[in-house]
Image (tube, rainbow, N blue to C red):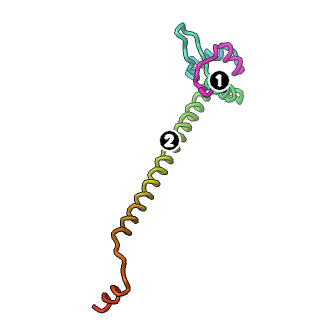
């Protein structure tokens, strides 16, 4: 059965470095710069998750394009803000959909109430009204 929790810290630094295609010292540098925040065991050893590995690969891709670590920090910050904004937009869309559903239901209920309150009009009633 495949694992679905990509945030679970599983990998020691040597395995994480190998998966990301970097030297373990590079991971330490990235951690000092705040680009990555691995979990720590009670003994202080670093443990990396699949999410961390994905982030490390993104850092590697940006630096391979010639970007400095300062530039990488800015890009990663902006990408994080974009993901947050997209998540917020999705939440607001769901909220709007819920409100629209509630509105349609309220309108249907008002229309049902109108039908209940209206009395049927007979042709003779119309004729009586016209004579007045």
Q: What stretch is highlighted in magenta?
A: 2-21
What count of labels does the image hold?
2
Q: Main secondary structure of the magenta part?
A: loop
Q: Is residue 105 left or right of residue 19?
A: left
From the top left corner, tell me how far across and down residue 95 is, in percent: 46, 47
**Quadrant of the rendered structure where residue 110 is?**
bottom left
Seen at 44% across and 52% down, the residue is 99
Task: Let me know if residue 15 is in the magenta part.
Answer: yes
From the top left corner, tell me how far across and down residue 104 is, in percent: 45, 58
For disc 2, the marked residue is 88
Q: Which of 41 and 78 is in front in this view?
A: 41
- Tell me the element at label 2: helix
Seen at 59% across and 13% down, the residue is 46
**Quadrant of the rendered structure where residue 22 is?**
top right
For disc 1, the marked residue is 53
From the top left corner, tell me how far across and down residue 58 is, in percent: 66, 28
Residue 9 vs 45, above or below: the answer is: below
Task: Let me know if residue 37 is in the magenta part.
Answer: no
The quarter of the rendered structure image containing the N terminus is: top right
**In the rendered structure, which disc, 1 or 2, sits on the residue that comes first in sequence?**
1
């Amino acid at each position: 059965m495949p694992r679905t929790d990509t945030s679970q810290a599983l990998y020691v630094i040597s395995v994480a470095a190998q998966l990301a295609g970097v030297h373990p010292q590079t991971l330490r540098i990235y951690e000092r710069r705040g680009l990555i925040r691995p979990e720590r065991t009670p003994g202080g050893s670093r443990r990396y998750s699949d999410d961390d590995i994905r982030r490390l690969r993104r850092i590697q891709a940006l630096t391979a394009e010639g970007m400095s670590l300062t530039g990488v920090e800015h890009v990663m910050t902006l990408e994080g803000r974009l993901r947050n904004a997209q998540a917020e937009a999705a939440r607001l869309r769901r909220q709007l959909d819920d409100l629209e559903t509630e509105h349609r239901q309220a309108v249907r209920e008002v229309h049902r109430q109108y039908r209940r309150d209206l009395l049927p009009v007979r042709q003779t009633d119309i004729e009586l009204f016209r004579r007045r």
